[in-house]
């Protein structure tokens, strides 16, 4: 197991995020400097997930003229991910810094569903920054998840695994294929999950606005051509009415076809 | 004294139904130019669905742009021989079918054909006839009309981009393409608006325009040196194909064409490389996208305001000078880009470049119609946009090659600046030479321009089915 340690200065009340990929030993150290009134020692202890760790309280002495170093080694196994805080008190004050130990998270928001059509195919994808051991896809049925096995069902599913990206292709879509799909990046220590919603529409859905617009176009074209014909027949009838004596005067009018 | 002389066509209305034509052309520009730009929003979806990378999908956009420009002469040909109305309605039909077919695509190659070729062809058939029609209907306020009509591409992109994004979210790309096909079929409505009109031409071009043979032109019973025999009443004749392209031999037009070639080579580069350049010098993504938005919005402003400006009486005779000024200023802006290395300095560049870009776009049809006249406008515009095709296709990759070999964007922007300045200088030189040659002939260009839009003594006639109803007493 590797030793990893983290080093921070007085960024009080701040949270540091650490991505843990596999079980290992981690040393978290808090380096505190510039405390007013320059005490000779301070009292510090550690908390895990808000609860004080037993026997973690200790007196910390100055390392050199200004700094206190307060550190501890933690053995992080599968259940040990969470918030770790080092808390130290001087005079009447208490300060803390929190380390957040977690698996890499897929941060992109997927609140908009992916839309596709009955009989079509659709590609759902997931991306993550660190390379997991493998990926897995689940379909959610209410509260429980069902694993999608692409090798067992090659007519309907295809899974592509490519380092940091995975793609699930769902073929021959039907209405039942709609719902929540969960992609899971499996790390040694824990899995990181993200979901995407799939909506399956029938072909009639986009056809409705299309037919509406087409009807509008036909109506407008007919109206415009009728208006023109009406205008022309009105002009023609006014020409026939006038007598020939105006023939000499220049008559300007729109010649309309 | 024939009474025929008194039964003349009309002057360009400069209003009235002309504004409906402008509205129609505006919608044509929205449906063709803006939709072309919005197709790139679909690329991410195509890449996911067909498992291809960016370069495979980028071909679609190039194909649409290229086909639209290459087939522009075809559009003006159909407009001349049938009618502008038929050309636009046909184009709208084709483009709409192309988009509807694309919604059923099973591969990227299918999309190349349906979206790239078919839709591009449809747009080509609408674009040139609609622009030509605006030129026929306006004279005094031509530049303003063109400014309003051409602002459609800017406003259309602005409005259509979020709409397309919304459609993709609700209906996925297939449904979005289907509905977009429906929207594009509104081009047929624009076609219906293009009411044909018979114009009376100014004395420089004694052969009048007759609407029965399309919006381009046709010699109709003219008393002019071009025709050998007097026409029979009621006879309609269309321009023979060779006559249609007579303007190609005009030295003025050749100079204009050369300058357009240079212009098209230079003008697309800054649009493509501004954002990468900004990111390269350290501007954030957010700010870089904002620069493009500024370009787009100021483009619209430039369209309309420059059009209005060059319609003012004092500037009207110097319209080509204004055009050269706009292009030259763009070139100068490009030269200064390598010196601008912060967001605060790039904003004025975006504003200036965007304004002059909008300015010259509005003036292209105006300058072309000043050179060739309303009669050949449709065919000339076809040739002009055809000349845009090859530089549009070739110059962004050349710019990219320059960036890759030199490692900086300086060479690309310098190339763009040179191309734009050469375009302006070429036109300026030829205009100056013609002006000096014209002075001893005692026909100053100033008067010629002024006569264009004023009422004249009719000394020729137009025959037309409607006009055959003549009072025999006056014959």
Image (spheres, coloured by chain):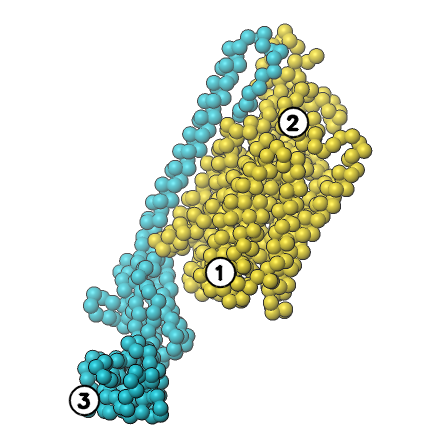
Chain colours: A cyan, B yellow
When the figure is inspected, residue B464 is found, relative to residue B187, above or below; the finding is: above
Label 1 vs label 2: CA separation?
A: 49 Å
Q: What element carries label 3?
A: loop
The quarter of the image holding the N terminus of chain B is top right
In the rendered image, is residue B121 in sight? no
Q: Quadrant of the C terminus of chain B?
A: top right
How far apart are the two marked residues, 3 and 1, measured between alpha carbons? 54 Å
Q: Is residue B391 left or right of residue B60?
A: right
- Between label 3 and label 2, give the one nearer the viewer: 3
Q: Which residue is drawn at 36% across and 41% down?
A: A212
**Residue at x-position 60% and y-position 64%:** B409
The answer to whether the residue labelled 3 contacts the one labelled 1, judged by CB atoms less than 8 Å apart, is no
Q: Nearer the viewer, residue B301 or B219?
A: B301
Q: Where is residue B181 in the image (x, y as percent from the top left)?
A: 44, 46
In-front residue for pair B135/A218: B135
Residue B272 figure quarter: bottom right
Q: Which mark is residue B201?
A: 2
Q: Tell me the chain of label 3.
A: A
Q: Where is residue B248 in the image (x, y as percent from the top left)?
A: 71, 41
Q: Mark 3 points at which residue?
A: A54
| Disc 1: which residue | B288
């Amino acid at each position: 197991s590797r030793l990893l340690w983290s080093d921070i200065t007085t960024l009080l009340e701040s949270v540091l995020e650490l991505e843990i990929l596999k079980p290992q030993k981690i040393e978290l150290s808090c380096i505190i400097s510039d405390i007013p009134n320059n005490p000779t020692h301070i009292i510090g202890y550690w908390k895990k997930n808000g609860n004080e760790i037993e026997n973690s309280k200790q007196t910390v002495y100055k390392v050199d003229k200004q700094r206190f170093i307060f550190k501890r080694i933690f053995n992080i196994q599968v259940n040990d991910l969470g918030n770790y805080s080092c808390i130290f008190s001087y005079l009447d004050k208490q300060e803390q810094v929190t380390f957040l130990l977690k698996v890499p998270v897929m941060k992109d928001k997927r609140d908009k569903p992916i839309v596709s059509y009955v009989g079509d195919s659709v590609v759902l994808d997931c991306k993550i920054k660190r390379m997991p051991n493998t990926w897995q896809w689940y379909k959610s049925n209410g509260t429980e998840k069902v694993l999608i096995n692409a090798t067992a069902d090659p007519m309907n599913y295809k899974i592509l695994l490519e380092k940091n990206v995975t793609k699930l292709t769902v073929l021959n879509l039907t209405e039942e294929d709609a719902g929540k799909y969960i992609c899971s990046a499996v790390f040694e220590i824990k899995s990181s999950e993200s979901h995407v919603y799939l909506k399956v529409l029938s072909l009639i859905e986009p056809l409705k606005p299309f037919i509406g617009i087409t009807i509008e176009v036909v109506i407008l074209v007919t109206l415009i051509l009728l208006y023109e014909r009406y205008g022309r027949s009105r002009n023609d009838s006014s020409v026939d009415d006038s007598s020939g004596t105006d023939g000499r005067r220049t008559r300007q009018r729109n010649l309309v076809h | 004294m024939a009474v025929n002389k008194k039964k003349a066509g009309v002057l360009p209305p400069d209003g009235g139904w002309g504004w409906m034509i402008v509205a129609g052309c505006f919608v044509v520009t929205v449906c063709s130019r803006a939709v072309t730009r919005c197709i790139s929003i679909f690329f991410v979806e195509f890449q996911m669905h067909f498992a291809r990378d960016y370069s495979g999908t980028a071909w679609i956009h190039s194909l649409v742009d290229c086909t639209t420009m290459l087939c522009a002469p075809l559009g003006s040909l159909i407009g001349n021989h049938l009618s502008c109305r038929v050309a636009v309605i046909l184009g709208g039909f084709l483009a709409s079918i192309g988009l509807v077919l694309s919604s059923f695509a099973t591969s990227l190659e299918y999309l190349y054909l349906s979206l790239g070729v078919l839709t591009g062809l449809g747009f080509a058939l609408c674009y040139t006839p609609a622009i030509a029609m605006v030129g026929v209907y306006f004279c005094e306020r031509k530049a303003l009309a063109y400014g309003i009509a051409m602002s459609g591409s800017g406003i259309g992109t602005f409005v259509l981009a979020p709409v397309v994004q919304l459609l993709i979210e609700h209906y996925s790309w297939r449904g979005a393409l289907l509905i977009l096909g429906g929207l594009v079929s509104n081009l047929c409505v624009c076609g219906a608006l293009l009411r044909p009109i018979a114009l009376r031409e100014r004395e420089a071009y004694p052969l009048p325009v007759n609407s029965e043979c399309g919006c381009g032109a046709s010699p109709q019973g003219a008393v002019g040196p071009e025709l050998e025999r007097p026409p029979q009443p009621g006879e309609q004749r269309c321009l023979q194909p060779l006559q249609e392209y007579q303007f190609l031999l005009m030295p003025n037009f050749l100079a204009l064409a050369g300058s357009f070639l240079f212009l098209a080579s230079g003008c697309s580069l800054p649009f493509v490389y501004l954002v990468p350049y900004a990111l390269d010098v350290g501007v954030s993504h957010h700010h870089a996208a904002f620069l493009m938005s500024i370009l787009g919005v100021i483009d619209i402003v430039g369209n309309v305001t420059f059009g209005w400006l060059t319609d003012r009486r004092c500037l009207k005779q110097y319209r080509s000078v204004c055009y050269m000024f706009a292009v030259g200023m763009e070139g100068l802006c490009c030269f200064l880009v390598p010196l601008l290395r912060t967001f605060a300095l790039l904003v004025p560049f975006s504003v200036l470049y965007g304004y002059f870009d909008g300015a010259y776009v509005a003036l292209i049809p105006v300058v072309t119609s000043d050179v060739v006249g309303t009669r050949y406008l449709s065919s000339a515009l076809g040739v002009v946009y055809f000349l845009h095709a090859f530089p549009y296709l070739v110059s962004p990759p050349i710019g990219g090659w320059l960036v890759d070999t030199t490692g900086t964007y300086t060479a690309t922007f310098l190339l763009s600046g040179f191309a734009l300045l050469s375009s302006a200088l070429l036109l300026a030189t030829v205009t100056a030479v013609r002006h000096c040659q014209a002075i001893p002939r005692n026909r100053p260009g100033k008067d010629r321009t002024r006569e264009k839009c004023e009422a004249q003594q009719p000394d020729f006639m137009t025959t037309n089915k409607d006009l055959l109803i003549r009072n025999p007493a006056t014959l």
